Image (cartoon, helix red, strand yellow):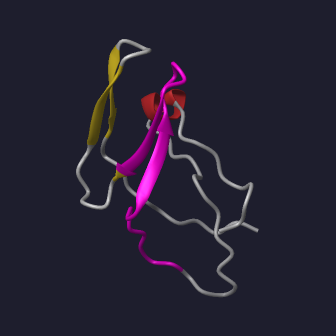
Amino acid sequence: MIPGKGRPLTLEDSEAGEHAPLMVFDCRGYEPIDFGFGGYWKAEAESGTKFDDIDLSSGEEFTEYDEKGECPVMISNFRASFSVTK
């Protein structure tokens, strides 16, 4: 991974059906073919509430309640794709 590259997926991206480059890899001639959402992820709601240790490895959605924002939050339909950048 190249530090400082990529950006979070925003609500606007999601509503528009757009992807976001969450991370950028320096593959040095290799071409990745798949990505697993293993390990733990972090997310921040629009209210500023932070959610840590989100386990997406099973492929199942993440659901929680944002007390500060007074609304449910969810991560679902996540998938990965690769594109070459220079």
- Determine the residue positioned at 38% across, 55% down: 79
Q: In which quarter of the image is the N terminus?
A: bottom right
To which quarter of the image does residue 57 belong?
A: bottom left
- Identify whether 49 is placed above or below 31: above
**Left or right of 26, for residue 47:** left
Foreground: 11 or 45? 45
- Compared with 40, 33 (above or below) is below
Give how far across and how far down residue 56 sits, in percent.
Answer: 33, 54
Q: Does the magenta stretch include residue 72?
A: no
| Quadrant of res 25 | bottom right
State the image coordinates of residue 77 (x, y, percent, origin top left).
31, 46
Outermost residue toward the top?
A: 70
**Count of residue discs:** 0
Is 35 covered by the magenta stretch? yes
Using the rendered view, name the quadrant where residue 85 is placed.
bottom right
Residue drawn at x 34%, y 16% is: 71
Q: Which of 10 and 44 is in front in this view?
A: 44
Is residue 4 shown left or right of residue 47? right
Q: In this view, does 23 lie to the left or right of 64?
A: right
Q: Which residue is drawn at 66% across and 87% down?
A: 29
The stretch of residues the image draws in magenta is 32-54
